[in-house]
Amino acid sequence: MKAVIIDNNKNLVWSEVPDPVAKEYEILVEVHAAALNRADLMQREGNYPPPPGWPEWPGLEVAGVVLEAPANCRWKVGDTVCALLGGGGYAEKVAVPVDMALPVPRGLSMAEAAAIPEAFATSYLNLCIEGGMKKGDTVFIQAGASGLGMAAIQLAKALGAEVVTTVGSEEKEKFVRELGADVVINRRKENIAAVLAKHPVNVAMDCVAGPNLGPCLETMAHGGRWIVIATLGSPLSELNMLDFFKRGVKLIGSTLRSRSSETKGRILGELEQKLWDSFSTGKIKALIHETLPMSEAEAAHAILERQENLGKVVLTCKP
Ligand SMILES: NC(=O)c1ccc[n+]([C@@H]2O[C@H](COP(=O)([O-])OP(=O)(O)OC[C@H]3O[C@@H](n4cnc5c(N)ncnc54)[C@H](OP(=O)(O)O)[C@@H]3O)[C@@H](O)[C@H]2O)c1
């Protein structure tokens, strides 16, 4: 089969590789669409290797058709599924643990379904499980127009939270307002901490951290949970620990990729229960900025590098 290999010069090359072999309790999926994530850019730079046992080529989520399934599992040959992966999605086929696949929600295209697993599972893990988000909470989501932000805003709104988010342009501001964001901060023009001081946050999902983290933490509601999931701003932050401990704020670090297949399966099961009907009715959408063929992975990565995307970028693969 073919897959998008990262060559020695960090180019993405659509190349011939050995077919994957499904192990016990795995399904083999014919990939029709694979969505991009910023983690793929980091993997390409050599900074984010796949966890053990997964293919070396990138791709954290796909949608496609089941080619092989073990007996006595929920899947049969021909079922359409979307799946969360540890890697290997930029390919014609991928082997996936049975519990890391979900049915394509009724009425969604393969491209839309491929755009769901990573962003919605990360949002659910951090807002609901790590953050304990409740109805009526104020939630802060950095990079609201990113693939992840698109999912997190809709999840938080669906569960009754007030959403404060950041964007880098006016076009992105319009996009996140349409998703339901209540307060939008243009990070290039406004002081984020000054806005948060007017909207004390109970739960934050932060992919930026850096110098803004300290001042923002000082504005948090008593007992708030601030979850750092990446350091796009900088890995270094200065914190006032006096204020921090007096207000009982919790600072949490979190990654989805490193969690066990069992944990990921549990998160996906809860997502299916809580959100799948909302995808089918169109109440929650997997919003796609652009779809390109798998052989144009370089051009797809460039969209994320230029920070242009409103929602997800997806690669498609014709079987
Ligand atoms: N820990 C985890 O488990 C986990 C899981 C999934 C994603 N993540 C992280 O969540 C973030 C979003 O992921 P994604 O795939 O949705 O990314 P994406 O679609 O590429 O969006 C990233 C956006 O972040 C914003 N941004 C803010 N500060 C930035 C900076 N200094 N440099 C570059 N971009 C900056 C930009 O939007 P604006 O210009 O509008 O601000 C950019 O478009 C990434 O950092 C990713 O690594 C973490």
Image: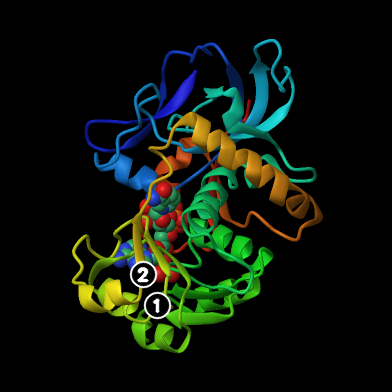
Q: Is mark 2 within 8 Å of ligand 1?
A: no
Question: Label 2: how many residues lie within 10 Å, few (<14), some (14-19) or many (20+)?
Answer: many
Whole-percent x and y of residue 251? 33, 62
Q: Residue at x 58, y 77 (%)?
A: 174
Position of 271 relative to 150 (above/below)? above
The quarter of the rendering in which ligand 1 is drawn is: bottom left
User: Which residue: 27% across, 79% down?
Assistant: 243
Looking at the image, is 288 positioned above or below residue 107? below
Q: Is residue 276 above or below residue 203?
A: above
Q: Amino acid at mark 1?
A: Met
Q: Is residue 127 left or right of residue 241?
A: right
Residue 317 image point, x, y percent: 58, 33
Disc 2 is placed on an element classified as: loop
Quarter holding residue 303: bottom left
Q: Name the residue beneath numbered marker 2.
A: 249
As measured in the structure, the alpha-carbon distance from the residue carrying label 2 to the one carrying label 1 is 7 Å
The answer to whether mark 1 is within 8 Å of ligand 1 is no
Tag 1 secondary structure: loop
Mark number displayed over residue 114: none
Where residue 226 sits in the image (x, y, percent)?
Answer: 39, 65
Residue toward you, 273 or 307: 273
The crowding category of the residue bearing disc 1, from other C-alpha atoms within 10 Å (few below 14, some 14 to 19, many at least 20), is many
The tag on residue 220 is 1
Please report contact status of discs 2 and 1: CB closer than 8 Å, yes or no.
yes
Quadrant including the C terminus: top right
